[in-house]
Image: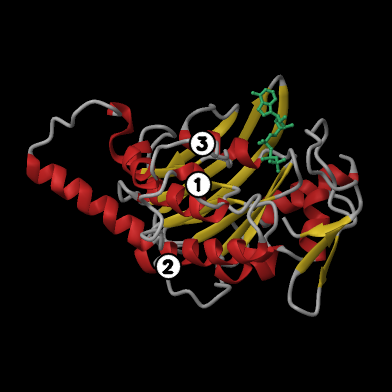
Amino acid sequence: MNPIAKAREAVAHTSSHAVPGRRSGGHDTAAGAGSDPVVALRGAAVRVGGRTLWSGVDLRIGAGEFTAVLGPNGVGKSTMIKVLLGALPAAAGEVQVLGARPGQANDRIGYLPQRRSFDANLRIRGIDVVRMGLDGDRWGVPLPFPSARRRAARARVDEVIELVGASAYAHRPIGQCSGGEQQRLLIAQALVRRPELLLLDEPLDSLDLPNQSAVAALIGRICHHEGVSVVMVAHDVNPILHHLDRVVYLAEGGAAAGTPTEVITSETLTRLYGTPVEVLQTSDGRLVVVGQPEAPAVHTDRHDTPGSGHAAG
Ligand SMILES: Nc1ncnc2c1ncn2[C@@H]1O[C@H](COP(=O)(O)OP(=O)(O)OP(=O)(O)O)[C@@H](O)[C@H]1O
């Protein structure tokens, strides 16, 4: 076995679920080894376009945790979300989500796909976008609900809009809301059915720094105060670092999971990627990963050059 495969095997066997469950940020949630996991993968692999993106992934994500899925561009982070939703079958191994096969518990999951911006001329209001999370499959058709259920639905939409702090602009056309405002409204849409698990695909992408912090804090509150488990694909871990319970780093040959301080280290990432990786900390606490490899055949829109330093994620 070559040294890289050996290193990957070592990481796959020690890190994915054997990293001790010490908590990072002092969030006292019900998560941990004792409770049923919201997500469990065993020996999982995924193939797209005839190529294996990752394989041998063993992973347990506890209930009530805020977990980030990290890794180089093109490693298959968004694809993992698709696997969890049952949109793409695992090529090998076992995958369970909320105790069921992927796709079978989707009515208990809120999902925010990778960001799509709204056309500035779109007249549909923010509140209507949120409402679509409840009855989007019947858009434009009068609700057959009795009036008590209609009132309850309206109350839930108002409640969730208030929860994300979007009351001031929810009646404006969504195309006229800022990127951060649109993202809050989309998070409200994903929350409106009271999901137990929220799957978020790069929700901070293309937001400016203040909005990244504000939306990260909102997601942290939704997780730790509302008790919704969150699995979030992130390109940069720094805006969410202080809200996270766990991180999962994906690599071609496995995954490393644990608290941020356990996983985002030179030693763990060097073992995972089988190549020297250095984790540096700036004076303001930001993490910078140097030397993390690019996955092969990735798209090229926002990639760093291989071997260059970039924010952890
Ligand atoms: N249906 C498909 N057919 C062929 N290749 C695909 C398909 N879907 C995804 N891919 C490829 O699989 C790889 C992983 O894609 P994915 O979007 O999961 O990566 P990612 O880790 O989320 O990347 P990024 O950080 O750049 O968003 C990419 O190289 C992508 O081009």
The relative height of residue 146 versus residue 17 in the rendered view (above or below) is: above
Q: Is residue 154 left or right of residue 103?
A: left
Q: Which marked residue is nearer to the observer: mark 2 or mark 1?
A: 1
| Disc 2 C-beta below 8 A from ligand 1 | no
Q: CA distance from mark 2 to mark 3?
A: 36 Å
Task: For ligand 1, tell me if the residue under mark 3 lies within 8 Å.
Answer: no
Report whether 183 appears left or right of 169: right
Name the kind of residue labelled 2 in the image. Answer: His
| Mark 3 nearby-residue class (10 Å; few <14, some 14–19, many ≥20) | few
In front here: 300 or 47? 300
Disc 1 packing (10 Å; few <14; some 14–19; many ≥20): some
Q: Which residue is tagged 3?
A: 121
The N terminus appears in which quarter of the rendering? top right
Question: Secondary structure under badge 3?
Answer: loop
- Estimate how packed mark 2 is, as few (under 14), some (14 to 19) or many (20 or more) residues with alpha carbons within 10 Å: many
Q: Residue furthest top?
A: 50
In the rendered image, which residue does mark 2 sit on?
A: 224
The secondary element bearing badge 1 is classed as: helix
Which residue appears at 60% of the width and 48% of the height? Answer: 202
Task: State the residue position of label 1.
Answer: 176
Q: Residue at x 59, y 62 (%)?
A: 211
The x, y position of residue 196, in whole percent, is: 36, 51
Q: Nearer the viewer, residue 211 or 172?
A: 172
Three-letter amino acid code at the position of disc 1: Gln
Of labels 2 and 3, earlier in sequence is: 3
Residue 259 visible within the image: no
Q: Is residue 272 visible?
A: yes
First reached walking from the N terminus: tag 2 or tag 1: 1
